[in-house]
Image (cartoon, rainbow, N blue to C red):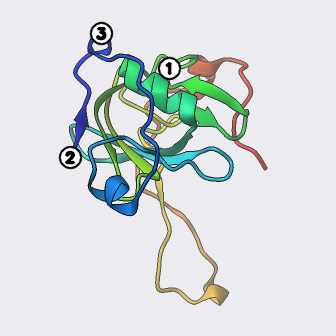
Amino acid sequence: MTASISSPDTLETRTFAPRCSIEQVEEGQGLAPRFDEAGLLACVTTDARTGEVLMLGYMNREALEKTLQTGRAHYWSRARQMLWCKRASSGLVQEVEELRIDDDQDVVWLRVTVAGSGASCHVGYRSCFYRRVPVGRQPEQGIGLVFTQSGKTFDPEQVYGDAPNPTQL
């Protein structure tokens, strides 16, 4: 069953269903998300047109509620410890075309269209998954990442200016 989002105006504030039974969670019609011990759900975000994986993010209760209410992707930034809407500083708005939840309701999948350059990665690439890891090699050979995108879609310095980089060491 899919929860298609047609427009922000057609959605109302939703309260999540309680998790009463395995049958209700797996086969029922109520949205009863299972947030982890940190209060988060993993969220896989793909391009609605191509199916390409754009990013993996996390949602807390507020981010999921705001996504449902507005039709725009909201996430919880683990690095910044704050709610963020994908667009606040970049203009790369993610409009949700479809929101799905997995069988035990602990992972969300968003199918989105992205405004502007169509990119979703803060580094400037279209997708956050812009490198491939070769498999089947012996560890002593070392692991060299292979770029899968020919170049950046936008210049992060022009888009973000002097905003702090969210990547943590």
Residue 31 horizontal side relative to residue 40, left or right: left
User: Is 86 in front, or is 129?
Assistant: 86
Identify the element where label 1 is drawn.
loop
Number of numbered discs on residues = 3
Pointer 2: what residue? 1
Quarter of the image holding residue 25? bottom left
- Calculate the distance from the C-alpha at mark 2 to the C-alpha at mark 1: 28 Å
Whether residues under marks 3 and 2 lie with C-beta atoms below 8 angstroms apart, the answer is no
Residue ID for mark 1: 87
Residue 9's disc is: 3
Q: Residue at x 57, y 90 (%)?
A: 138
The amino acid beneath tag 2 is Met
Kind of residue sitting beneath label 3: Asp
Q: Which element type, helix, strand or loop, lies under badge 2?
A: loop
N-terminal of the pair, mark 3 or mark 2, is 2
- Report the Cα–Cα distance between label 3 and label 2: 22 Å
Circle 2 packing at 10 Å, graded few (<14), some (14-19), many (20+), is: few
In front: 150, or 25? 25
Residue at 36 percent of width and 16 percent of height: 12
**Displayed quadrant of residue 84:** top right
Q: First in sequence: mark 2 or mark 1?
A: 2
Tell which tag, 2 or 1, sits nearer the viewer.
2
Height in image: 79 above or below 141? above
Residue, x 63% and y 86% (percent of image)? 139
**Mark closest to the chain's N terminus, 3 or 1:** 3
User: Considering depth in this image, is 157 or 17 the residue closer to the camera?
Assistant: 17
Q: Secondary structure at mark 3?
A: helix
Q: Residue at x 22, y 42 (%)?
A: 2
